[in-house]
Amino acid sequence: MRPMQGKSVIVTGASAGIGEALAVALAARGASVTLAARDARALERVQARCEAAGGRALAVPTDVGDPEACRLLVERAVAAFGGVDVLVNNAGITMHARFEDVKDLGLFERLMRVNYLGAVHCTFHALPHIKARKGLLVAISSLTGKTGVPTRTGYAASKHAMQGFFDSLRIELLDTGTDVLVVSPGFVATEIRAHALGAEGRPLGTSPRDEQGATMDVDTCVALILRAMERRQREVVMTLTGRVGQVLKLVAPGLVDRLAARAVRGKQA
C-alpha cells in the first residue's frame, strides 16, 4: 500500500531541513512534488534528489510572503501535475530575542507574513483543487504554537495563529472528505535556528541554543510526518514533553510557564 503513489503534493520551504527531506521521501513513494522556496539554486538540487528517488518534481521559486507568488505556485502545480492532492505548509522563519530588546517591530510583521499568512494564501488557492480530490492540508507548526516560549514571542504568535486557522478550517471541511493535519515538532536538527532573526531583525548566523542537547533528527521527524499523512491524522505532537505539557497546561499553567523559562535558559549556547 503506497498512499502517496501518484499524488500531486506541494511542499513549501522545500529547499532545506524538514521540507527538503519530506519532499525527497514523498518522491520516493511515487508522488509528484512541487517544490517551493526562495532559493532557486537550492530548489534545483532538491528537484534532482526527488527525481533520483523515483518521483517527478517541479521547482517553483516562491516567496510565500507574497500573495501573488502563492497563487502562481498553485497554478504551476496544477498545470504540471493536473491538480493538487496535498499541500504541506512548511515554510517558516523563527526569532530569538526578548520582546523588550526588539529594535524593529517589523520583525513581527515578517514572521506573521511568512509563517501564518503564507500558509493562508497557499491554502486559499490550493483548497478548491484539494477538495476536488478529497485531499489533505498539512501545517508544519511547532510546540511553540501550543504554549508560550520566552524569546520567541513573534514566532509563538505566528504558530498560534497557524494552529487556530487550521483547527477552524478542519471544522469547516467536515464531511467534505478533505482532511487537515497539524504537526507540532520540538527541536529538530535543521538550520532554522541559525537563521533566526535577532533583536535587530537580522539573522543571527549561529544557533542560540546548544545543539548537542535533546534534538530530533530530521529523518525521524519526517517519518512521523509521513505516517500521519498516510493515516490522515488530525494532529501530531512529536515529543513526550510536548504531550505532557498540553495536559499540565490545563491543570497547572503556572508550572508550564516556569518549565518553559527553565528549558530555554538551560538550552542557550
Image (cartoon, helix red, strand yellow):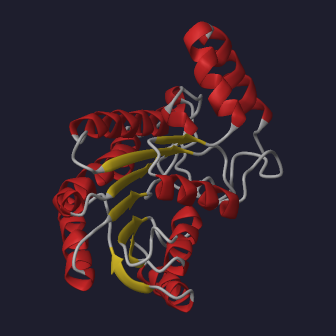
Q: Position of residue 240 (x, y in %)?
A: 71, 34
Q: Nearer the viewer, residue 126 or 102?
A: 126
Q: Position of residue 197 (x, y in %)?
A: 52, 49
Quarter holding the C terminus?
top right
Q: Is residue 144 left or right of residue 119?
A: right
Residue 225: name its quadrant: bottom right
Q: Is residue 179 left or right of residue 148?
A: left
Seen from this angle, which residue lies furthest front?
1
Q: Position of residue 255 (x, y in %)?
A: 68, 12
Q: Residue at x 45, y 54 (%)?
A: 92
Q: Residue at x 16, y 59 (%)?
A: 128
State the count of labels. 0
Residue 162: name its quadrant: top left
Q: Position of residue 164 (x, y in %)?
A: 35, 33
Q: Nearer the viewer, residue 266 or 48?
A: 48
Q: Residue at x 49, y 53 (%)?
A: 231
Q: Nearer the viewer, residue 103 or 221?
A: 221
Q: Nearer the viewer, residue 34 or 111?
A: 34
**Residue 89 to residue 103: above or below:** below
Q: Is residue 140 left or right of residue 76?
A: right
